[in-house]
Image: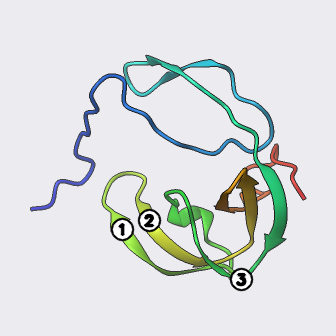
Amino acid sequence: MPQIGSKEKFAPLNTFEFFVIGGAPPSLIRLGKKHAACRVHAYPLTLVKKSDSEFFVDHPVNPMDVSSFEQKIVRGDYQLQFPPLVLNAKLRAEHYVLKQEEKTYYVLKPSPEIYPSVNLP
């Protein structure tokens, strides 16, 4: 029987990369069920363009965020947890192409209905 929602434990001092759209995050946050203190190092990205073609997304995707008729998950690896996540996903949806120095990132555009505070073009 698969273990849906199984617990993941990470050793102290692990590093995670994530994207914040709409402003700089605080430098110290509390994360997870036990509210562990986490230090945040923010690096600004430059918006290169907005596109709606197929792309490989650079972050895990909640399938509920790709729910409109025009958007589609072409392929990806589903991770069974709650909420479910799609890893290594190829999508056909509106997205941002962002750049930091030599590295380019492809980030799914958040739904304005679900995330009204995000106001990028």
Q: Tell which circle, 3 or 2, labels the residue nearer the N-terminal end.
A: 3
Q: Is residue 30 above or below residue 46?
A: above
Badge 1 marks a residue whose secondary structure is strand
Q: Which residue is tagged 3?
A: 53
Q: Nearer the viewer, residue 26 or 116?
A: 26
Residue at 87% across, 49% down: 119
Q: Are marks 3 and 2 in contact (CB under 8 Å)?
A: no
Residue at 67% across, 61% down: 104
Q: Which mark is residue 86?
A: 2
Q: Nearer the viewer, residue 21 or 3?
A: 21
Q: Are marks 1 and 2 in contact (CB under 8 Å)?
A: yes
Report the side of 118 relative to 16 (left or right).
Answer: right
Label 3 – label 1 distance at C-alpha: 22 Å
Instruction: State which quadrant residue 64 falls in.
Output: bottom right
Q: Which residue is tagged 1?
A: 78
Q: Position of residue 77 (x, y in %)?
A: 36, 71
Q: Which mark is residue 55?
A: none
